[in-house]
Image (spheres, coloured by chain):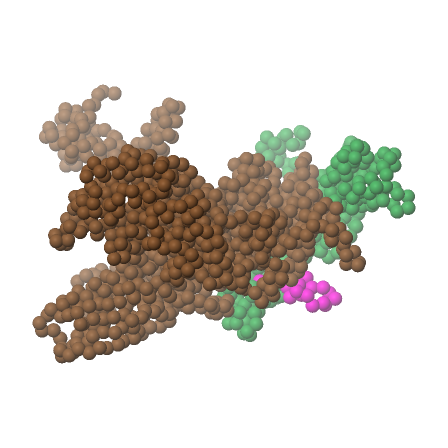
Chain colours: A green, B brown
Amino acid sequence: MEGMSYARTPRVKIRELKDDYAKFELRDTDASIANALRRVMIAEVPTIAIDLVEIEVNSSVLNDEFIAHRLGLIPLTSERAMAMRFSRDCDACDGDGQCEFCSVEFHLRAKCISDQTLDVTSKDLYSPDHTVVPVDFSDPSGEESSEQRGIIIVKLRRGQELRLRAIARKGIGKDHAKWSPAATVTFMYEPDIHINEDLMETLTLEEKRTWVESSPTRVFDIDANTHQVLVVDPEAYTYDDEVIKKAEAMGKPGLVEISAKQDSFIFTVESTGAIKASQLVLNAIEILKQKLDAVRLSEDTVEADDQFGELGAHMRGG
Amino acid sequence: MGLNQESSEEQKKQNQNSSLGKQLPNHQVGDLGIDKQFLTAPIKSAVDKFQLLPEFLKVRGLVKQHLDSFNYFVRTEIKKIVRANNRIVASKHPNIYLRFKDVRIDKPSMMVDGTDAEVSPHYCRVSDLTYAAPIKVSIEYIQVSHGETSKKEKNDVVIGRIPIMLRSCRCILYGKDEAELAKLGECPLDPGGYFIIKGTEKVILIQEQLSKNRIIIDTDKNGNINASVTSSTEATKSKTVILMKKEKIWLQLNQFPKEVPIMVVMKAMGMESDQEVVQMLGRDPRYGSLLLPSIEECAKNSIYTQQQALDYLETKVKKSSYTSDSSEKGDRALSVLREVFLANVPVRQNNFRPKCIYVAVMIRRMMDAILNKDAMDDKDYVGNKRLELSGQLLALLFEDLFKTMIDDAKRGIDKNLEKPSRGSRFDFPYYISRDTITVGLERALSTGNWDVKRFKMHRTGMTQVLQRLSFIATMGHVTRVDPHFKKSMKVSGPRALQPSQWGMLCPCDTPEGAHCGLVKNLALMTHVTTDEEEGPLISLCYSLGVEDLELLSGEELHTPDSFLVIFNGVILGKHRRPQRFATAMRKLRRAGKIGEFVSVFVNEKQHCVYIASDGGRVCRPLVIADKGISRVKEHHMKELVDGVRKFDDFLRDGLIEYLDVNEENNSLIALYDGNATPETTHIEIEPFTILGVIAGLIPYPHHNQSPRNTYQCAMGKQAMGNIAYNQLKRMDTLLYLLVYPQRPLLTTRTIELVGYDKLGAGQNATVAVMSYSGYDIEDAIVMNKSSLDRGFGRCIVLKKFTAIKQKYENNTSDRILRPDRTGENAGRMQILDDDGLASPGEIIRANDIYINKQSPINTRRSIGSSAASLPDNAYRPSIQTFKGEGDNWVVDRVVLSSDKNTNLCFKFVMRHTRRPEIGDKFSSRHGQKGVCGTIIQQEDFPFSERGICPDLIMNPHGFPSRMTVGKMIELLGGKAGVSCGRFHYGSAFGEPSGHADKVECISETLVKHGFSYNGKDFIYSGITGCPLQAYIFMGPIYYQRLKHMVLDKMHARGNGPRVMLTRQPTEGRSRNGGLRVGEMERDCLIAYGASMLIFERLMLSSDQFQVQVCRECGLLGYYNHKLKTGICSLCKNGDSISTLSLPYACKLLIQELQSMNIVPRLKLAEA
């Protein structure tokens, strides 16, 4: 551990990669970097989400704000988001209007004319820009499923109508969770498991079995042939200490030693579908870099002193 | 649903297995289908009787008490009342009469252009009408036309309108299914049991009172033992007290200003021989010796005969100021004895013997109590209580009004017949006014004041506006029991939990504070009886071997083996084999030959058999057991599930019966089949039914500290959620709704029975029990901002504003104008449509006008021209502006209807969507309330390696002192529920019967899904990314959002309005008032020595005032603006005037004192 966390040569190994799911290892760095990455993924990677809704007709059971809130939470494909401008610092429009650089306009028109309930879903949201559309969860194989029909916004009965115009804008998860591209971003420390083989051999097979079963997750197993206890899946270990407690209860403390490797992390990233999980990680790194740049740039300037006050000099000195 | 059932069966199996023993962990039944261990296990015929409950509630509904009582009134009682007073006879012409032949209540309707049109309750609610039905009678009367009389008959004469209870047999909702109800705009889950009076929903609270016509032995405040009977018959109400005072026995009666010796009364009733009296009391010499002083007293006054006694009593009777006839004078004492004294015991042909025996029994009971304190009655015992329901109360009122109507009609007729030149035709029905009954009933129901002159009854607060804050508040309100008498503060007895409340009244649900323990709620299965026909029951008793009272001597009455048979408080006679008699009665009841609510109770101690068929007794159903073996068998339950058998079939087949509190004392009730012994007579249906509707929402209440459950009962009513299916069609003045209400992950059986799973009031929040940020002290909770963004705790507030287009007496009326789009108010009128009303969907800001109304300046004097042609300057604007806190209020709906006085009425509903903010109140279902302390970004929130991030963080200090273990189990069960996909149960006392999941089972499920058995998770800090030092208890808990929100409460003021009188700042948020530096705050400032601050707060910032003070006389002068000097009006000069500033309130005090001829003088000194 000594000095290792300062090595700053992180390595990434991708384990699994799907459109909306990624699992990778991040090694040779410390918790601060891992956590910074996680935090940026959740809160600072920009996406596009509906931000302004103008309702023309709404005779549905849900009220205007209700529908607007639901619309906002629909994930939109946001590959363009990194290149877009925040509407507040858009030059083309005066900041609150809409233009191609900062916003996308959507239309929704639905009216139920049959006796059956009509589901108004995200698929009914029409946008002229094909790069920004509601996320399509359907399987490419084309199987009919409930997800196929998109996210339900409201259900209409005969005669009810919903007509609206919505403007989607770029934003970040810090402002509102609807702009967060991450469904789940989490990491764990890789566990380091050492079985004391000598002590283990003093156990009978029955004892071994009960010990192995004491773990709520399947971390250990017994080799069918050699009757040796093996670590099958160290990452299934949830740091629950159950096996250690069990070993103590059996009168064999030190049967197993488990510690967390302080410099390797296993990341799990699930995306809402707004951007691909891989892109999410890359964008996060990009943004993290930008943020670091901002700090570095200000470090050289004298203004840094003004900006940080006493802290500025302190930072440079320290 | 099917899946759910399947898994619950699996769960049951699991429970069974675990109850069989530890050797069967997930034991698979062998391929042969035989499991030896299972076969050898002792057979516990644990019939799952739970299914009875939904069936019971299906036939009964949750407010059956109200409905039954009202139905009884409408079907039976009203006919009785009319039959008892069915003739109106002209006093001078006895051959001119009107007779009511029959009475019936029609379907609810309203008058539209003189004809009846059917109305729906919802229509009444929206348009401020009374949901009432006409009372129609068939009459037969004598018509006089041109001096000739002829008999006429008429059907369907309306004598008035009676408000109809919703869902009663006369309501149009009766027997309707869900689709039909939806068409009528009614919620199928609404319990009914209330009335709609002028558009507001009114409940008649269940009134609790002491039983009528029963002997109660008690001590008065002087410590004297007494026996009292509150008699109540159709004709009179009286209270008779027999008490032991100074070793003598006295009678207290309102008609006697002073107590009279009981022996004299006995003699006056014809029991002249002392020996007979002693015999009636019984042979025991102790009774005789207790009576001796009274007998001696009687002899001292030389009263030996009935006539002497009557003469003596005559001197004691209260001299009423308006004695009707002096000739009657001699009989007054006798008539008091006949009609007032123990009015419930009938006197037939001046036969006072039953009354004498009754008195003897009272004295005997009293003496028992003197000799043995155990024989005292407990006034708080539920068996001595009667619950008065809406039907009885309405009957009382109706009877009075009906009689008033008859009297009025009679007076009108007499007046008309007296007139020498009366019209050629005399039409009887013309004199029957409909308004007496209509207005009388409506007024009583809307004010809650029950004034019945005949009984000197003046009760207030009988009705309340139905709480519609949440579905559960409504349910709680219709099952509430209110004590009608004011209990003194000192005694704690009435407030204490009574053992006899078991199963009848909810032990948890009572308010805190002043009404604690007095206001109660009915338990889930409680039924309140209605009156039953007495005649057949009495003759049945005689044919079952009751020896008639008339034939018995005093001696025979009290032989050791004889039991008195008392029917509804009247002594019928005696029976030698009480058990046999009781068993016979019960057999007949179980066979359905007599009413199922007749109670038979053998009191061994008092040697009495009590039979009760009166209304207002609380009772509950129980399974009958023969020698400890339940009559309800597996096949019965199967038939029930298959729908072949109904709850009523169980009753009819004698498998289940209703027991009231008294009869429960004759039975031994086992909780489960398993605990039954051969002596057991009954078995409970389900233990959780001892709780009421509201306490039934709490999961695992039996693991909580008891006051916590009580707190939750109070808080559950404040939770936001869904109110009813028709919530958006209703026009409530204030409505709080949750945007995304959820069904609790951890449910109970009661929740499903009541429908809370369909109209929930809360959300399942993932809660981490840990400390975070310091903004979580004192029960504050930390919330996840992203959760709030996604809709957690988001709520809709709907407020109603009303405007009326008033019509005035001079034919003018208000008018609504097209908004002025250019004038000075144009900005505030932006949201108005061209019709002058706010347009739905518009965002309304504070001070915006929502109705552009004008009123005529002159509303009294009649104007010459027609009202329409009034010039514009004859109107002044009476616009209504919106005063609402917060941004983004939206006009939701605008409804036009007519109000009570047929004015046009506009109702505006404004909507506001709010997300939780710091200071909003939340609570779990375990009496653990807390405000939101801070809102924190999701990335700063802790997370688990699965990616679970809590919605809410609760401080662990909330647990040790509150001891809400149920909450912890809820968390565990909820966590197991989400991981395995099955709703878990936590019904009260449900573990043995499988209606609550056991912690072991839950832990097993948790472990199966990779969680720790104890519900704790390994968690990383979101700020640093490092693991936390401790495992964190985390999982879903159902959280309620309570109606208290900072937005409605926050208040501050700089400058603002002042009170006219004192010129001090106003008080209260609604008047934009100031914040008072009170006495205690002032004390602190004094102690601190902050004199300048006190001066500023109490004077400069409050009511500083400059006065002119005369140094000579010390009185206040005035400032003459012309002369620019102060002048003293007493000294008539301005020589020695000083200007002084003091609080205006002080100046006011000085002047007020002066007005009372007190002269306060201010003496000024040089500073």
Decide if residue B213 is on the left or right side of residue B701.
left
Decide if residue B229 is on the left or right side of residue B971.
left
Q: Nearer the viewer, residue B818 or B1078?
A: B1078
Residue stretch rendered in magenta on the structure: A130-153
Quadrant assignment, res A237:
top right
- Residue placed furthest toward the right: A225
Assign the C terminus of chain B to one quadrant of the image. Answer: top left
Name above or below for residue B349 compared with residue B91: above
Does B786 appear in magenta? Answer: no
Residue B184, image x, y percentages: 44, 68
Q: Nearer the viewer, residue B621 or A194?
A: B621
Does A137 appear in magenta? Answer: yes
Q: Nearer the viewer, residue B337 or B420?
A: B337
Assign the N terminus of chain B to one quadrant of the image. Answer: bottom right
Identify the residue shown where x is 29% and y is 55%. B346
Name above or below for residue B196 compared with residue B335: below
Residue B1039, image x, y percentages: 55, 48
Quadrant assignment, res B440:
bottom left
Q: Does the magenta stretch mainly form a helix, a strand or a loop?
A: loop
Residue A3, image x, y percentages: 77, 32
Residue B724, image x, y percentages: 48, 59
Name above or below for residue B399 compared with residue B419: above
Identify the residue shown where x is 73% and y is 57%. A19
